[in-house]
Image (spheres, helix red, strand yellow):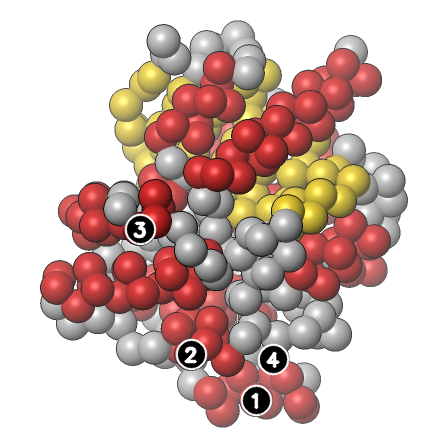
Amino acid sequence: MTVHQPPQTVRANGIDICYEIFGNDNAEPLLLIMGLGAQMIHWDDAFCEQLAARGFRVIRFDNRDIGKSSHLTGGKRLTPLELLKLRFLRIPVAATYKLIDMARDTVGLMDALGIKSAHLVGASMGGMIAQEVTLSFPECVRSLTSIMSTTGNPRVPPPTREAAAMLMAPPPRSKEEFMVRFGQTWKVLRVGHFPEEEALDPGRAERVFARGLNPAGVGRQLRAVLASGSRKERLHGVKTPTLVIHGTVDPLVHPEGGKDTAESIPGAKLLMIEGMGHALPMRFWPEIIGAIDKHAHGAAAQAA
């Protein structure tokens, strides 16, 4: 039975961060960083428990502007025109904060919990934040696992039209609309037939809705990603043991994004998962959790 501490809130980097811990206090600390507009519960409870069972103290948390962490203010909804200017004219997008601020949130949370260094596992935007922590605070990172993420390199192919349209869709106006949208969104992101996931989607959507939505915050997070530019050149200097995991059919962050990340970090290992989109379906957990386990414990053994 996994030791589980219920969600708590702590002050870090000037904001409140809601976090939750699975596993023993003396186990290897492993921080899970979620993606754009995704609450910490998108790291499924059972996923966290399985990692904890492999000898990790697993910490998941809500990024700023999502779930039960501080909601900020400012910024307007992103327009297609701004995206076009960024893509073709390299005119930067205005942002209330950038990925470096979210990286500072992560390190601030570690400080508040008395953790000097940890294994970082980031998904999508969370992978970008984990990369930024590794670049700016290397002493805090025992190992890096970047999942379905990218370097910010503008040469990586864009999302599919369907995935991009989903990202730019206006926020749902009612709970009913949210419930429908949640199911549609994950169907697009998973790519393929996942009946076992679709059966769980209504319950997941209920839980997300109950914790509270913040559409304006998702917009600010998206701006943070777009305003932070490319990390590619800086990643060449990373000495932290790195694992990159990516799905072969990811519609949101092109598989080239994962390959570019692995190519940019010296000695990085790349695991391409056949048939995986931009999601972490249960059928891929054995491979993903096994890879994280081997990578993080391997890095810990080398450092010892």
Give the residue number, with chain letter if any, for mark 4.
Answer: 92
* In the depicted structure, whether residue 107 falls above or below residue 224: above
| Comes first in the chain, label 3 or label 2 | 2
Closer mark to the observer between disc 1 and disc 3: 3
Label annotation for residue 84: 1
| Circles 1, 3 touching at the beta carbon (< 8 Å) | no
| Cα–Cα span, label 1 and label 2 | 14 Å
Residue 275 in the image: state x and y as whole percent: 58, 53
* In the depicted structure, whether residue 35 falls above or below residue 291: below
284 or 261, nearer to the observer: 284
| Cα–Cα span, label 2 and label 4 | 21 Å
Q: Residue at x 29, y 28 (%)?
A: 8
Closer mark to the observer between disc 3 and disc 2: 3
Under circle 4, the secondary element is loop
Give the residue number, with chain letter if any, for mark 3.
Answer: 198
Residue 259 in the image: state x and y as whole percent: 75, 56
Location of the N terminus (image quadrant) = top left
Under circle 3, the secondary element is helix
Q: Which of the 4 quarters of the picture holds residue 17?
A: top left
| Comes first in the chain, label 2 or label 4 | 4
239 sits to left or right of 289: right
Label annotation for residue 165: 2
Closer mark to the observer between disc 4 and disc 3: 3
Residue 63 in the image: state x and y as whole percent: 41, 47
Disc 3 crowd rating (10 Å Cα; few below 14, some 14-19, many 20+) is some
| Comes first in the chain, label 4 or label 3 | 4
The amino acid on which the numbered mark 2 sits, given as a three-letter code, is Ala
| Cα–Cα span, label 3 and label 2 | 21 Å
The amino acid on which the numbered mark 3 sits, given as a three-letter code, is Glu
